[in-house]
């Protein structure tokens, strides 16, 4: 098997992803700098060849963005956090092996998008299960700063839960734009659509989200 | 009472998004290179990459429009591929390593079943025992420091250490165990293969029948229950061919000698003169008594293990003590002493009053 060649990546989308919190510099990224020296194209080629030495590099490069995306959706470390990450990784590798990643964006940002999509799906399933087994009980109100903090958190939860109930393309577009901080051209690349289509999804998604939030029948959370 | 959530304006929605975006995330653990800290996740990634691309969906493959017959055939083939059994690490006590092409794969400790693809070498760390379910249905148990490579669907290689095999009836198929000195072919049996740099390769059969083909020449040998086949790696490496059963090497017991003596002599000398030493060969089977020395050892040990599994620890200890007393230099005596030690520890844990008696009984 051919030895993996080490080259400098220099992906411009990485910088954009870093500003959005997808792969920003942190202590968690320290070892990542080492594996970042392997270009995305070479890493993907190694994965497609079945070169098991690529597993270490892909783990070190994608673990942080995938974990961040899942944490951003769930806003906390869930009990099955590790399972979510593993499932997201499996999805990423499966998609790479099927040659469905066209390389129009950075591998990190793309993997984070896949992980966010996976997390939204998991959240949807979880909410459906919760509604079935134990209807959610609204929290008692408090007073002062604590009340304000709880109210702010509740607002985020409401938005997030309604997003999870929406059609996935629209929900993911709104999430990538509003929460992950991608612009429309990046979203178009990440989701494999035109900029116009991404913009349409964003507008329709926001409109539907507001309707859901203001519809009494939709206020389930 | 709790008020219903208020309606949300565009501005409030924007504010909620901003809060969500700026919300601090829980701190992430540092990403440690997998070589330094193997994880379940790393192992899953490595194995998924090693498996290659998953089969494409039928609607994509047959987008051009093949006939129903082709689709049905593909479905059948797809099911067959999906239903293919794989080697799996079923249980482990302690740690292990996975190697492929000279590179250590990331592994993790845990109780989840771990798939073991072809070409991977499984190595039990010191103090670890592993249990593997082979795709043929065979049950493989690795002792500490053993190494086993999964060659293909019908063959494994014992690289070092001791591995016991429990192979179900395979019908026309066979199961092959390769060592540096010999190939062992079975169709359904229980046996142990031991590969040691000093003692060579040993094949002990408990049930059924195995055929041993020396790698460096010589006739294939049939090994029956209670018999042991062994060779010396030094001789195997230097001598191109092993002698036939009719010309046993000097210093080794002849197959014509009484089995009781030959077994004991072989066990006592340990290595003989380094030639293949079947005990006894296929042509000597009719001449050998029903229970040879090795057969008696095996029977004693098996009965002791059965008693242990049934919870009759005292009886198990007594049988092990008899084994170590009658055959103090036999290979199984070492195992018997280890088992005795474990049993005494268990007995001590359950009732300390019984231990002095057990120790007296089982002391070799």
Image: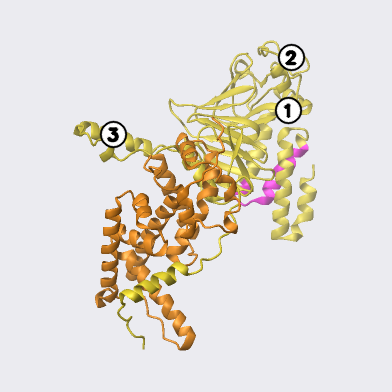
Chain colours: A orange, B yellow
* Front disc: 2 or 3: 3
For residue B159, above or below residue B361: above
Q: Nearer the viewer, residue B150 or B242?
A: B150
> Residue tagged by mark 1?
B199
Q: Cα distance, mark 3 to mark 1? A: 51 Å
Range drawn in magenta: B307-325
For residue B286, above or below residue A89: above
Residue B349 located within the stretch drawn in magenta? no
Q: Which quadrant, please, contains the C terminus of chain B?
A: top right
Q: Nearer the viewer, residue A204 or B253?
A: A204
Confirm whether residue A196 shows in the render: yes
Looking at the image, is mark 2 or mark 3 earlier in the sequence? 3
* Front disc: 3 or 1: 3
Residue placed at 72% from the left, 33% from the top? B331
For residue A143, above or below residue B76: below
Q: Nearer the viewer, residue A189 or B259?
A: A189
């Amino acid at each position: 098997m051919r030895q993996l060649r080490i080259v400098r990546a220099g992906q411009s989308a990485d910088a954009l992803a870093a500003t959005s919190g997808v792969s920003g510099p942190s202590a968690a990224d320290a070892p990542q700098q080492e594996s970042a020296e392997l270009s995305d194209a070479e890493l993907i080629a190694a994965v497609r060849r079945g070169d098991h030495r690529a597993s270490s590099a892909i783990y070190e490069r994608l673990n942080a963005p995938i974990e961040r995306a899942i944490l951003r959706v769930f806003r906390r470390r869930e009990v099955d956090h590790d399972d979510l990450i593993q499932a997201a990784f499996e999805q990423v590798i499966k998609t790479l092996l099927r040659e469905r990643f066209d390389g129009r964006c950075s591998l990190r940002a793309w993997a984070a998008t896949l992980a966010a999509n996976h997390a939204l799906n998991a959240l949807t399933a979880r909410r459906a299960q919760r509604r079935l087994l134990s209807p959610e009980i609204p929290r008692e109100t408090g007073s002062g700063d604590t009340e304000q903090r709880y109210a702010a958190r509740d607002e985020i939860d409401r938005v997030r839960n309604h997003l999870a109930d929406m059609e996935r393309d629209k929900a993911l577009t709104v999430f990538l734009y509003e929460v992950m901080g991608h612009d429309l051209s990046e979203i178009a690349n990440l989701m494999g659509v035109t900029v116009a289509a991404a913009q349409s999804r964003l507008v329709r998604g926001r409109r539907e989200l507001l309707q859901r939030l203001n519809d009494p029948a939709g206020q389930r959370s | 009472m709790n008020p219903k959530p208020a309606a949300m304006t565009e501005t409030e929605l924007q504010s909620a998004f901003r809060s969500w975006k700026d919300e601090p995330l829980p701190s992430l653990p540092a990403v440690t290179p997998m070589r330094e800290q193997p994880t379940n996740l790393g192992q899953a990634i490595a194995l998924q990459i090693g498996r290659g691309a998953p089969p494409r969906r039928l609607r994509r493959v047959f987008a051009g429009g093949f006939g129903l017959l082709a689709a049905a055939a593909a479905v059948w083939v797809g099911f067959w591929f999906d239903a293919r059994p794989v080697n799996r690490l079923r249980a482990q006590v302690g740690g292990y390593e996975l190697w492929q092409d000279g590179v250590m794969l990331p592994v993790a400790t845990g109780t989840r079943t771990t798939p073991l693809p072809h070409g991977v070498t499984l190595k039990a760390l010191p103090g670890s025992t592993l249990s593997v379910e082979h795709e043929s249905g065979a049950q493989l148990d690795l002792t500490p420091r053993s190494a086993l490579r999964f060659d293909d669907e019908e063959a494994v290689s014992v690289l070092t250490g001791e591995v016991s095999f429990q192979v179900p009836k395979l019908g026309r198929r066979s199961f092959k165990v390769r060592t540096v000195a010999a190939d062992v072919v079975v169709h359904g049996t229980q046996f142990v293969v031991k590969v040691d740099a000093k003692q060579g390769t040993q094949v002990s059969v408990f049930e059924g029948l195995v055929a041993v083909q020396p790698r460096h020449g010589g006739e294939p040998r049939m090994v029956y229950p209670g018999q042991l086949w062994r060779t010396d790696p030094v001789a195997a490496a230097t001598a191109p061919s092993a002698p036939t059963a009719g010309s046993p090497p000097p210093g080794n017991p002849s197959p014509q000698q009484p089995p009781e003596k030959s077994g004991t002599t072989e066990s006592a000398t340990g290595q003989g003169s380094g030639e293949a030493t079947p005990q006894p060969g296929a042509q000597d089977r009719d001449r050998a008594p029903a229970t040879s020395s090795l057969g008696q050892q095996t029977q004693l040990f098996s009965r002791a293990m059965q008693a242990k599994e049934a919870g009759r620890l005292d009886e198990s200890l007594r049988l092990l003590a008899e084994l170590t007393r009658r055959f103090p230099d036999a290979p199984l005596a070492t195992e018997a002493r280890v088992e005795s030690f474990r049993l005494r520890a268990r007995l001590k844990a359950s009732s300390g009053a019984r231990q002095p008696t057990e120790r007296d009984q089982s002391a070799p």
